[in-house]
Image (cartoon, coloured by chain):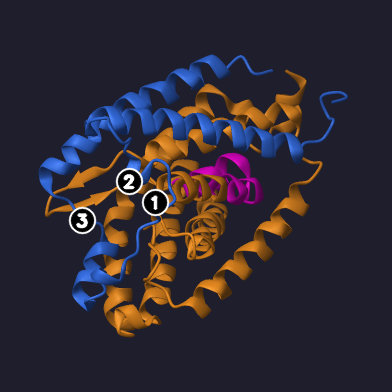
Chain colours: A orange, B blue
Amino acid sequence: MHIPDGYVDLPLALLFAALSVAVLSVAARRVDGELSDSRAPLLGVVAAGIFAAQMLNWPIPGGTSAHFVGGAFAAILLGPHVGALCVATVVTIQALVFGDGGLVVLGTNVFNMAIVEVYVGYAVYRVVAPYGEFRAAFAAGWLGITAGALTAGLQLGLSSAFEYQLVTTLAIMGVGHLVLGLVEGAITAVVYRYLARARPDLRPTAPAEASAR
Amino acid sequence: MTEWLPRALGVLLLLTLLAPVFGWAAGQVGYAEPLENAAEATGATDDAEAVGTAPFSDYGVPGLGSAAGTFVSAVVGTALTLLVAVGIGRLLGSDTDGPH
């Protein structure tokens, strides 16, 4: 889902860069001073884990592939604001160091993966959580990545390189990730359930316990 | 406080070791992502521009083979992400755990 340079028109890229800066600034202000020192390594490990996991392309029958994006996972484990900063760090390093995603569209990619997927995923998690944390984490991963893909489809479909074929880009990106998102949802749910059982103190609802250890 | 850290670093190492395996497997099946499918369907493929300044472009290392380059990229990227994210965490951190 990493959009390269040349795919999104410059005005759109600038608009989404500005939106990304605005949202991440608010996130940083909301987090500032509230992230205990004991959770800083957790932020680092989750970000590094997402980077490494994104390098694992899972071949899907039919010639498609999916890789874990991790926006919803980061949101659930770290909270949405730290999660957004976490995924934004990953997406930025991928573009600057590895050329995965363009530089002009860096803000666009950050918006899709670090903002839309994170906050939509977290909202879905909160809505479904009363019916079970496992299914909530699954739905968050599944619908979070689908929302990010639909946003990318919108940006592409409004750009000249894609000949403004909005219906085509929305259909391919949305339907494609609605199916591939099942993998995202499954990984999110399984890994989160394992961590929640093995280390409940790492959850964002338990900062006091984590700090006390 | 962070007794989970060694195990977590072990998991990260395992993921970096798996990266070349998945890279090889993905190459064998000739996969494509929906983004590439959308570009192909609308004729946008030729408009893509590579980032020429990336030192590890396409997760490869000049002079190294595909598997070795992918592994080195995975290690470098994972370590760099870890350092940067921990730094951001420290910047945004409180002194809940004591003075710093």
Chain at tag 1:
A
Quadrant location, the C terminus of chain A: top right
Observer-side mark, 2 or 3, equals: 2
A102 to A31, vertically: above or below: below
Chain at tag 2:
B
User: Of the residues under marks 2 and 3, which one precedes in the sequence?
Assistant: 3
Marks 3 and 2: in contact by CB < 8 Å?
Answer: no
- The numbered mark at residue A20 is none
At horizontal 70% and vertical 55% (from top left) the residue drawn is A27
Q: Which of these two is toward me, B73 or A3?
A: B73
Judged from the image, the secondary structure of the residue bearing numbered disc 2 is helix
CA gap, disc 3 and disc 1: 15 Å
The x and y percentages for residue A134 are 44, 41
Observer-side mark, 3 or 1, equals: 1
Judged from the image, the secondary structure of the residue bearing numbered disc 1 is loop
Q: Which of these two is toward me, B52 or B1?
A: B52
Q: On the image, numbered disc 3 is attached to which residue?
A: B32
Quadrant location, the N terminus of chain A: bottom left
Mark 3: which amino acid?
Answer: Ala
Q: On the image, numbered disc 2 is attached to which residue?
A: B58
CA gap, disc 1 and disc 2: 7 Å
Horizontally, residue B55 falls left or right of residue A93, namely left
Instruction: State which quadrant residue B29 falls in.
Output: top left
- The numbered mark at residue A100 is 1
Give a yes or no on whether discs 3 and 1 share a subunit. no
B67 to A54, vertically: above or below: above
